[in-house]
Amino acid sequence: MNARPPLRRGLLAVLATAALVLGAAAAAAAPGHPSGHSVTARPAPTAQARAAAATATCNPKASSLRPAGPPQVTSGSFMAKIRARGYLIAGVDQSTYHFGFLNPLDGQIEGFDIDMIRAVAQAIFGNPDKVRFKAISDAQRIPDVTSGAVDIVAHTMTITCARLQQVDFSTVYFDAAQRVLVLKNSAATDLAGLAGQKVCATIGSDSLAVISAAKATAVAVPYWTDCLVLLQQGDVAAISTDDSILSGLAAQDPWTKLIGPRLTDEPYGLAISRQHPDFVRFVNAVLAQLRTNGRWAASYAHWVGTPVPAPPPAEYGG
Amino acid sequence: MTSSVGVSPGPGARAPGARTPGARAPAARGAWWRPRTTPARLRLLLAVLVVLSLAWGVVAGLTANLHASAAASVVAVSEPLSLDAEQIYQSLSDADATAANAFLAGGLEPAAARQQYNADITQAAVRIEAASALVGSSAARTQLPGPRAARAGDGSAIGDDLATLSAELPVYAGEAGTARADNRLGLPLGAAYLREASALMRGTLLPAASDIYTRESRQLTGSSAQATGLPFIVVAVLIGLGVGYLLYRASRWLARRTRRVVNYGLLLAALAGTVSLVWLGGAFAAGRADLLHAQQAGSGPAQAFARADVAALQAHADESLTLVDNSGDDSYQQDFLAQAKLLGPGPGTLLAAVGPSGGGISADAEAWYQAHRQLRALDNGGNHPAAVQSALSGQAAAKFALLSSALSRGVDTSQAVFATRARQGRDALTALPAGMIVAGLLMAVGCAWGLSRRLAEYR
């Protein structure tokens, strides 16, 4: 790739600049986020002020609705409407290996997130295939849920207090944490050791703020796989984001390794419109079954690997 | 033999420095351009007519050469260069579209798609090399690493663009290859490499190819305008008519002076002059008509077809990339819509520019857009595999193939018209410069012969 340094450098300079701007913007848009650091002090409009106020009492891991019992499609419920329609509409990722990705071998979207959705479809229809997957970007997740374009989002989505102002979440179905992926020959042992070097994350992700806080130069690209391209081509020194995503990247390149401690806590939840608390309770009931009947562990073993930890405990806020 | 009117020169009659034979006659005293004796006048006339004849030969020959060499450069340099530029542009666009489309098939890439991609890359590489050689030979200044100001010309800009293409094409092919290899392993990383390759193609390679094409088309138009331009030929014809008029006046004067109706020497000169004038005018008119037709029915439509084809290819790549990407980010679909708007049909679009044959092609384009809308509906409705099938081998693929082959045919047909007529135009002018010089010489010989016969009668 020596043939291209001028272009690359130009591109990276633009990306790095964009990263700083976008990182700041992302942080500003999510003032209550645990990894938002000092940016929470930013002057905020009313909606953000409310979100910030809620932060004081918010526990992202214990804010979901308690199910009444095993999942049941009661008449008049949102689940009944979905059943009448004939399929569940799920907003998913299609480029995050092992969580939500389009398998080029069979053209199907697969992954750990997808398994959760299929379990919900199974509970509604008795058939895990009654799902229409809509591949959406990170930025589309909340708008698509609030507009009703999708019934549910399974998209490596961290439950945050700011997001809880806009959408409801299921209980935590996966415990992720921001970590760092480097090439196997890298001498770095953690993010602090990469200060001054280029570290890649996606545009609009919370990971950018953590990278900038560690004094590394954030490089923002549209997709996580784009980060791996830059890492393979030697244009960035590392990639930093949720370990779930990083392990998916590591699975595509055996010459990479995960380093450093858990930098943040990223509890994943399934996002559902605040209009449908009945559906939130229903999904929580499905997740409760998965935790105990071994299907959660089986999915984990299949997509993430062994040893399989205990599933994140279900905690409810209401 | 003594001259019948020869008078021995009187002392002091000799003008200082006058060494011409006419100076021998005291009657020829006065300005040299107004000799009073007939032989002296004849001698002066002879000199003037010979000089005018030769001057006509030179003026007509130079004018003919100006146009003939411009026409030859249209055929020998501009045409092949612009053909190379167009082929580079089309091959690269086609490679981008083919790579993206074949990617949809996963590991079992259709053999035809693979062959077409390879042929596109080879074609582009060969044409880049050929164009570099042509540019290098036609404009040595491209080789000079001089200051920026000195490199402002089209030639050096084309050289820079070609250097960019030569440097980036292997990088593109490398990324496309990595994309294919990762895709074969079932890794989503392949799509990232494909996006990267496509971004390089669209951000760097295609703009360079487009720039070369634009500049080449401009140079072609310039050479053609030089070959068909009127000012020089009008001046030359006026000079020719002037010479003819003087010749006519000279023969009239001679006829009165010598009481002979016909002077065969001057007649020969007049004939040669008339023939050369008619030949110059006729050949130029014929060559000009051919070259103008080559432009209007050849290179003009060929450019319009090529532009339309490239827009269609880019939209086709967008269609595939939207399916490859499928992440809710609709930037490729937005680009598809932008390219479709550019392509037309409709007033001011690229299809409107291809001329009367655009009707059937417009229908082809509409049919493809229709198939594309169905494909998007399938994909947005959650039926990704059916959408992929449509793009790979279904309706969308078939309709695009119709459109693309119609546009390629348009390019080829127009290019053939251009090549034929431009060659005819060049051939009409080829013998002209030499012919004009021979005619000038013939006129000079005729005048000299005709007048020296009269002059001889005074000796």
Image (cartoon, helix red, strand yellow):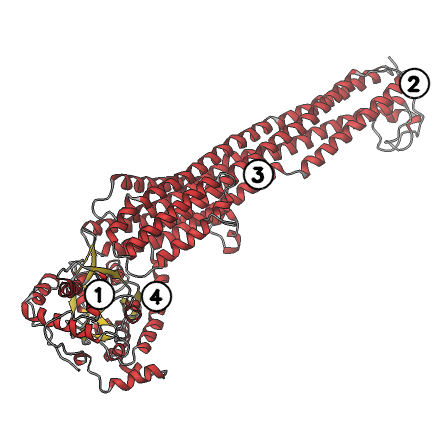
Residues marked 4 and 1, same chain:
yes
Residue at (89%, 29%) from the top-left corner? Answer: B14
Contact check, label 4 and label 2, Cβ < 8 Å: no
Q: Chain of mark 1?
A: A
Total label count?
A: 4
Please state which amino acid type lies under the numbered disc 3: Ser
Q: Which residue is mark 3?
A: B224
Contact check, label 4 and label 3, Cβ < 8 Å: no
Please state which amino acid type lies under the numbered disc 1: Ile
Which of the pair B285/B398 is nearer the observer?
B398
Q: Secondary structure at mark 1?
A: helix
Of discs 3 and 2, which sits in the foreground?
3
Whether residue B144 sits left or right of residue B53 in the image: it is: left
When the figure is inspected, residue A209 is found, relative to residue B369, above or below; the finding is below
Of discs 4 and 1, which sits in the foreground?
1
First in residue order: circle 4 vs circle 1: 4
Tell me the distance, in whole angstroms, between the alpha carbons under discs 4 and 3. 46 Å
Tell me the distance, in whole angstroms, between the alpha carbons under discs 2 and 1. 128 Å
Please state which amino acid type lies under the numbered disc 2: Val
Q: Which residue is mark 4?
A: A15
Please state which amino acid type lies under the numbered disc 4: Leu
Residues marked 4 and 2, same chain:
no
Q: Chain of mark 3?
A: B
Which circle marks residue A98 in the picture? none
Q: Which residue is mark 1?
A: A82
Tell me the distance, in whole angstroms, between the alpha carbons under discs 4 and 2. 100 Å
Q: Secondary structure at mark 2?
A: loop
Whether residue A245 sits left or right of residue B232 in the image: it is: left
